[in-house]
Image (cartoon, grey):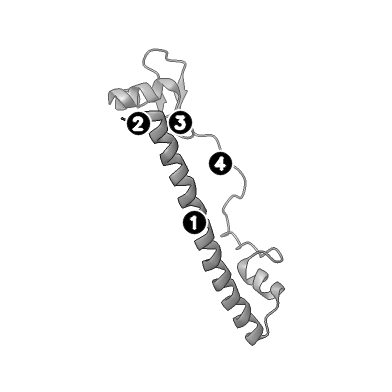
Amino acid sequence: MATSVASQLAKLRKEREALEKREKALMARTHDKALSKIVQIARDAGLSAEDIAKALGQGKATKKPARAAGKSTGSRGKVAPKYRNPAQADQTWTGRGKAPVWVQALKAAGTLETALIK
């Protein structure tokens, strides 16, 4: 007697769940062993949890690197449009951000170059 697709799918899902549980258990054991080693090394070196957190970047906020002189830290300025919709001339796009639907259509057709503003 052939088993139905639904019963086969249910069996596969059950097997997948069992495998996922086994994977989680194995990862937990592996993580526990690694953490034990890390804790022992930290104790041997006289490091505190705060020292480790700071080294991981979770402690106090770290200083951000200084910006080069003359560079703006704000948002970018306005940019001239790079593309114009051939079907509707009042629609333009700078080439930044999410492409409008008409640009996506031209890209799909392979004719985006025809919309370049010269």
**Quadrant position of the N terminus in the picture:** top left
Q: Marks 4 and 1: which is nearer the front?
A: 1
Residue 94 badge: 3
Query: Viewer-proximal residue, 6 or 110?
Result: 6
Q: Sort mark 1 into few (<14), some (14-19) or many (20+) by Cα contacts within 10 Å.
A: few
Label 4 vs 1, first from the N-terminus: 1
Amino acid type assigned to the residue bearing label 2 in the image: Thr
What amino acid is labelled 1 in the image? Arg
Task: Give the position of the C terminus as an image quadrant.
Answer: top left
Front in this rendered view, residue 114 or 4: 4
**Place of residue 32 in the rendered image (x, y in percent of width and height, measured from the top left):** 58, 69
- First in sequence, mark 3 or 2: give its number: 2
**Are the residues tagged 3 and 1 within 8 Å (C-beta)?**
no
- Three-letter code for the amino acid on which mark 4 is drawn: Arg
Q: In this view, which residue lies farthest toward the top? A: 87
Residue 97, position in %: x, y? Answer: 49, 34
Q: Is residue 84 left or right of residue 33?
A: left
- Element type at mark 1: helix
Q: Nearer the viewer, mark 1 or mark 2?
A: 2
**Is 59 or 104 nearer to us in this picture?**
59
Q: Is residue 22 left or right of residue 47?
A: left
Single out the residue that lies furthest toward the left. 110
Residue position marked by numbered label 1 in the rendering? 22
Q: In this view of the protein, which residue sits in the foreground, 77 or 51?
A: 51
Image position, residue 43 (x, y; %): 66, 83
Amino acid type, mark 3: Thr
Q: Nearer the viewer, mark 2 or mark 4?
A: 2
Point 56% across, 41% down: residue: 76
